[in-house]
Image: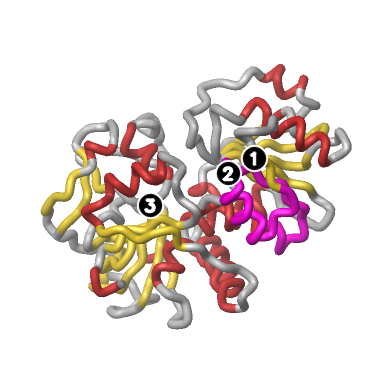
Amino acid sequence: MKAIQITHFGGTEQLKLVEIPRPEPGPGEVLVRLSWAGVNFIDVYMRNGSYVRSSTYQTPLPMTIGMEGSGSVAALGSGVDDVGVGDRVAYCLVRGSYAEYAVVPAWKLVRVPETIPLSVATALMLQGATAHYLTHSAFPLTPGHVCLIHAGAGGVGQLLVRLAKLRGALVIATVSSPEKAAIARSCGADHCILYVQTDFRMEVLRLTDGVGVDVVFDSVGKDTLHRSMRSLKRRGLCILFGASSGQINAIDPLALAEAGSIYFTRPHLADYMVTADEIRGRAVDLFTAYQDSRLSVTIDRELPLGAAAAAHRVLEGRETHGKLLLRVDEAAR
């Protein structure tokens, strides 16, 4: 089968289209014939070596990239009885989706209703589940809360804005351009800050009458984190869930006190997708909201599997206005 692999950590030049043996499912596993693979920053972190010390997201070499996909069940391992051959399925947090086939533990799969395109289901897995756990679990938003969402026009950012509004929160989003501000507003953002022109911390304080926000959802990292912390109200929560501008290596505990005795967390999605019930519960919430037209999904662009390197360059260049997908099966057009 065709797959995108790396043999060394590094830049996009490490992503190679190769032919490798098709895997076979073991006990409790399912072979999925992939139609779509989602492109996410976790793929970048795994490619460039940022997660080389991670036990949660292991990166053995050589490695087939990709942590999110959808398609149909091609074969079952022994002991699998909750899905059948031909079922439409989607999943995330199993490495190897940049390939024509992938072996996935059965408990990590979710069935996709016929009314939901597989491309949309893919977007609602890793990015959708991220937005869901952030707004429902890491900080359960309720009416009256004020949140700051960085990169509000990106794939996760748009879903975060939409879910935060469904939870009744007031949303302040940061974006890099007027075009992206329009996108964030169309998702429901109450206020948009062009961070390249305006000090977002000062604008947040102005918008909140000097109080600050209850929670910051920060996927940017190096360029924003310290001002994110200073944008919080006393005892607020800063959630760093990505590092598109660079990794954060250390935080001075005193800085948390000086910012107003705030709280800080750097979560992994995997710790919020621990059981089949948790995975399927989030998927059902997201799928239902999409089917009820309460949640929409923006697909920015679709590229063929062999263009994985170009897809990573687009993502790292912050050029996306929604979900970025690799089309594994040409029939999925």
Quadrant position of residue 77 = bottom left
Mark nearer the N terminus (2 vs 3) = 3
Mark nearer the N terminus (3 vs 1) = 3
Vertical side of 79 occupied by 155: above or below: above
Is residue 212 in view?
A: yes
The label shown at residue 177 is 2
- Give the distance between the C-alpha atoms of the residues marked 2 and 3, in whole angstroms: 23 Å
Give the side of residue 4 with respect to residue 281, left or right.
left
The residue segment tinted magenta is: 164-191
Identify the residue position indicated by label 1 in the image.
Answer: 194
- Give the distance between the C-alpha atoms of the residues marked 2 and 1, in whole angstroms: 6 Å
Amino acid type, mark 1: Leu
Mark 1 secondary-structure assignment? strand
Front residue of this view, candidates 184 and 50: 184
Give the side of residue 167 with respect to residue 209, left or right.
left
Front residue of this view, candidates 121 and 75: 121
